[in-house]
Amino acid sequence: MEQVYAQPPDEQRKLRYLYRHSGIDIRYSVIPDYSREMHDWKFYPQTEGLEPFPSLETRMDWYRKHAPLLSVDAIRRCLEHGYRDSDITHLITVSCTGMSAPGLDLQLMEHLDLPRNIYRSSVNFMGCYAAIHALKMGDMICKSTPGTRVLIVCTELCTLHFQREATLDHMASGLLFADGAAAVLMTPDDSPGKGLYLDGFYAEVVPKGKSDMAWELSSSGFLMTLSGYVPELIGEDIEPLVARALQKTNWQKEEITHWCVHPGGKKILETIQKKLSLPPEELAPSYQVLRHFGNMSSPTILFVLKDMMHQLDYSHRNRFLGVAFGPGLTMETFMASSVSA
């Protein structure tokens, strides 16, 4: 970023400060250029001004090449616990960083050799909360259709959309977002094995924040607006949102054993922790995912959920409350409880 922005020394110091205080140590990208010298770049032009700057078409070409491969890797890890590709009856793909038709869903059908008559759907352009929206769709399918096996895969290649103008929005998104994929298998209640039972969902839109978090298409890629007011806006509404979500399932806040919070950024986690009066260890999995992967948009909360489930003691009653945020400003929640074998 320093090389591309070519800012004066005082502005470079500010950028380094933001990186040091981001809460992120490592991020991943399908673009190798970010960790190579200019003469080894594959995506960006080997010129100081990055001219000609990669077009939207170039970025979507990279998305079509890399998104299916990353998705298949996530799906393979998800299904290694005893299910086969042929068991899948429904496929839901989630992404806001690439668009085409035919799209990612058909590419995965070919890669996994899924039946041509498989039920498929796509959740596009919803941002960081889209995984919860997909879980809500999968929950409705499982409850209405016996014998289903709903596969959800969230894949985002956020780093394809780096922008060279040194605006606050571009710098914030450039130091926060990363690439990643996560997959979930959902089955009806009578399926054997350990897992989580989805008890309910609740969502709200905060209209006053619609201009503070936005995602727009442009000829040079997708443009992210990420205002510094977002943590404040979330802080104003998170407590009543959680109260209304718990009311829907007749749960009490004290009954929640696991808080699965989307790590949209360090400041967002700190604000939620303070507003909900949670001890620091309650959000440790969210901080860990942010530190090791950054914000990958839709897959991120599933990374947090996976870490929690791997450490779960299924001999005890466990109750989860998950929450994620995205454009709108949209706040989505899910409530889940543990199911033993």
Image: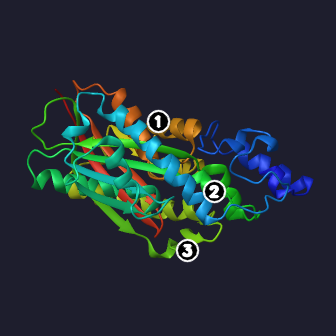
Residue indicated by mark 1: 285
Residue 259 percent coordinates (x, y): 38, 42
Residue 6 x %, y %: 87, 56
Kind of residue sitting beneath label 1: Pro
Q: Quadrant of residue 26?
A: top right
In the depicted structure, whether residue 67 falls above or below residue 340? below
Q: Earlier in the sequence, mark 1 or mark 2?
A: 2
Which residue is pictured at 83% across the width and 50% down the height?
Answer: 3
Q: Which residue is mark 2?
A: 173
- Outermost right residue: 9
Query: Callout 2: helix, strand or loop?
Result: helix
User: Which amino acid type corresponds to the residue marked 3 in the rendered image?
Assistant: Ser
Callout in the foreground (1, 2): 2
Mark 2 or 3 closer to N-term?
2
Q: Nearer the viewer, residue 165 or 89?
A: 89
Determine whether 169 is above or below 178 in the image: below
Instruction: Give whichever of 54, 195 is nearer the camera.
Output: 54
